[in-house]
Image (tube, rainbow, N blue to C red):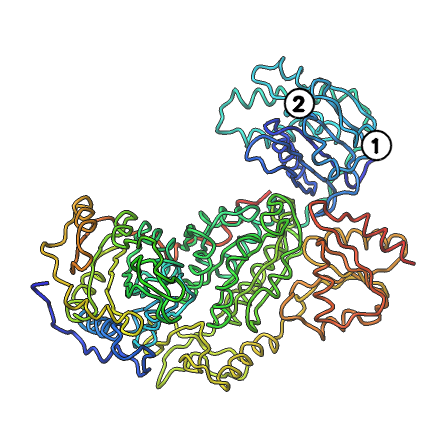
Amino acid sequence: MAKLPSISIAIVGSGGAGALTTGNSLLEAACAAGWHGLFTRTLGPQIRGGEAAALVRLAVHPVECLPDRFDLLIGIDWLNAHRFGSEIKVGPGTLVISDPQGGDPPPMVTQSGARVVEIPMKEMAKAIRDGRPNMITLGIAGRLLGLSIEQVVTPIEKRLADKGPAAIEASQSGIKAGFGVAAGIDFGMQLAPPNARATRRWLLSGNEAAALGAIRGGVRFAAAYPITPATEVLEWLAPSLAKVGGVLLQAEDELAAINMIIGSSFGGTPALTATSGPGLSLMIEALGLATSAEIPIVVVDVMRGGPSTGIPTKSEQADLNIAVYGLHGDAPHLVLAPQSIGDCMFTTQWATYLAETLQSPAIVLSDQFMGQARAAIDRPADVAFIGARSVATDIVGAYERYALAANGISPMAIPGTRGGQYTADGLTHSERGIPTSGTADHRAQLDKRRDKLEHFNFGDHWATVEGAGDVAVLTWGSVTSAAREATGRAAADGINVRLIAPRLLLPAQPERMQTALDGVKRILIVEQTHGGQFHRYLRAHYDLPTQVRVLNRPGPLPIMAGEIYRAITEWR
Amino acid sequence: MSTVDTRLARKPAEYKSDIKPIWCPGCGDYHVLMSFTRAFAQLGLPPEQIVVVSGIGCSSRIPAYTNCYGFHGVHGRSLALAAGLKVTRPDLTVVVASGDGDGYSIGGNHFLHACRRNIDMTYVVMDNRIYGMTKGQPSPTTEPEFDTALSPGGTRVRPFHPLVVALASGANFIARCFSGEPNETAAVLVEAIKHPGFSFIEILSPCVTFRPDEKSWKDLVHPAPVTATTDPGKAARRIMTDDGFNLGILYRGNREPFQPAIGATGVDLSELEKDFEL
């Protein structure tokens, strides 16, 4: 029996079959037992019903990307499995568990060379009072991976605590039956034992991490308009803000949400909203207002497939253009992108700090993949980035809200401060804030707003720069995790590849990028867009070596580590 | 409007800035500005404790002409901006200024939800039944037959009834004023600001440039023959059936304003991490 550092499991079923509950419970069981793990889901647009698949990767080390191929695929039923066949890769090494009552496995399974074992999970569930097939599935998966019955049962007991002892007993019986039937199956592999925990571990989604980062950075007001896949940011903030004396207000639309946070911040309370592409489109005008009036705000955009309504439940990186270039006029602002679930916390906290310090709107580009995925991660280290706005106090004489300070950052008077009265304005204004259409004032304020961002020292957090060598993979966002796994595999083959992933997209950091690229002759750009938006962004802001290749593909299929690895190794 | 309290706690001039308005000579909005400064003086509020929030249009220029804090934001969104400000700073007095285009057309949705939300603020709409800043296009309150370059022969579309909409949506105080009566308007503003919850004042404010016909409003307006009711049913009948020139406080509701608890709770941020602890 091979003891592997990482094993991946896909569980599919039609809506209501419980595939997602099974996947989440498996993740919780393994992570409580000390393994690392990642859970993502793929599902159709139906509110309930339709197709659903839980994708779980368990490992002895931190994991934040999907495997090239799944080791175990369990079909509770195959009714709608063809709809996401392309997203679940299986092969000759894969064990497929199939319920003969659940229809025939789709061609992606039968033509893959995978070994298929039939187990009548529905039939077995019927033998248990209130039994459900997905608990049999959970037992099978737990047994095959090498977990104990206790380890698998504990998270289910927690989940069902409020449903009473009968429900818990039915699930326990199902899990035990699953363990029993799986004892006779030769899977041929097991998870290697987990490493001892060096730090406390968290199990959370990127959306939850972003929300926590915002509160840590000082956010005490959020405005919310629900949108997939960003809603969890707001749903976690609603009770959490209340606990720390803040407040979340549900807005009537995204136009209201962004203006509410501008109002809150104008009044001195750091503020955030979260949305996805269609909502960001509606917020763009007010982002320009916050730029002109120099009001700090944070907008978390959890990207989904676009344009228009696109694919709300699946990931893409195609909001880069609108985030960077969407504002009318010359409107310098901050754009940041986290690179993992844990980094959603850091980057949103840092974005809050930067917005407050630089009196600028900040857009945080997360995406559906890391936003809605859950992973067990080592608790991120505390960082000292807590919003520190330059505030005008003890004002004597005429107050100039938009005074041309040397660093471009002029102290902001907060309502209630005597002598600081001014009108924040989207109109071109003078240093005092008085509307003007004069050339000199327009130019002076444009310069001020550009310089305060461009002259700021953003430090080493601007990007992830790892490894050495004359080949570099240049990527961003959640694709960074797959790229890191690919460069790791290449390194194991003796091919040194640099990984460069900017976390700060605006303002661009040409000098730092030049240093990061020092000695690099070839660049592989990797991004999840159809139009190569990141490639074009890099071309616009940076000097790149002459040898450039681009690996880009739109959603919903994630870019896998294996594809990046092949693109590296085949380019010799 | 029989008893107008004109006692002043401070001087109106304390609330006026030195910026010269861009309004046309004779514009009704000058008088609205006068009503603002007079009402603030009557209330005796320190200017730095007042925020005047607005959107876009002639009326929305008003914040900078006061000596209060101001926010001249984007078109139609002043109520949303004010909501975010007031719930996080309930200590401030928030007055929102708008016009019939800014407030009823592009900002229409926010009007409904601001009434419904009932946050303690005062919403003043200077209604001149025309887009003045863009030089004379029909607004949601323009008469159907009014001829403009954008609507030759008139829009032939029924005007919007802001007071009825406000009542149906849950506004807690509803009044109509005329800019040509600044003292009476100031008195209503004082009542509106003092009244808890969302107060809505429609001020008929003539546009002498694109609607010279509105100069006749001074002869049409008249004080409401009865005092304000607290009964929304009665208020609805009154507002639905009056001639549109009935001035005064027409409705005073008694809904609790919306104000969530805010401020330090003593809970350490590490408490929040417990949600994720393995």
Q: Residue at x 25, y 69 (%)?
A: B206
* Spot occupied by residue A34 in the image (x, y as percentages of width and height): 68, 40
> Which residue occupies the foreground of this view, A468 or A180?
A468
Where is B12 relative to A249, above or below? below
Where is A276 relative to A294, above or below? above
Q: Which mark is residue A136?
A: 2
Left or right of residue A205, residue A265 in this image: left
Q: For the residues labelled 1 and 2, say whether their Cβ atoms are less than 8 Å apart.
A: no
Q: Is disc 1 surrounded by few (<14), some (14 to 19) or many (20+) residues within 10 Å?
A: some
Q: Residue at x 45, y 79 (%)?
A: A402
Q: Which residue is mark 1?
A: A112
Q: Which mark is residue A324?
A: none
Q: What element does badge 1 sit on? A: loop
> Which residue occupies the foreground of this view, A72 or A538?
A538
| Foreground disc of the pair 1, 2 | 1
Q: Which residue is the extreme one toward the right?
A: A572
Dot 1 or dot 2, earlier in sequence: 1
Which quadrant does the C terminus of chain A fall into?
Answer: bottom right
Q: Residue at x 57, y 46 (%)?
A: A229
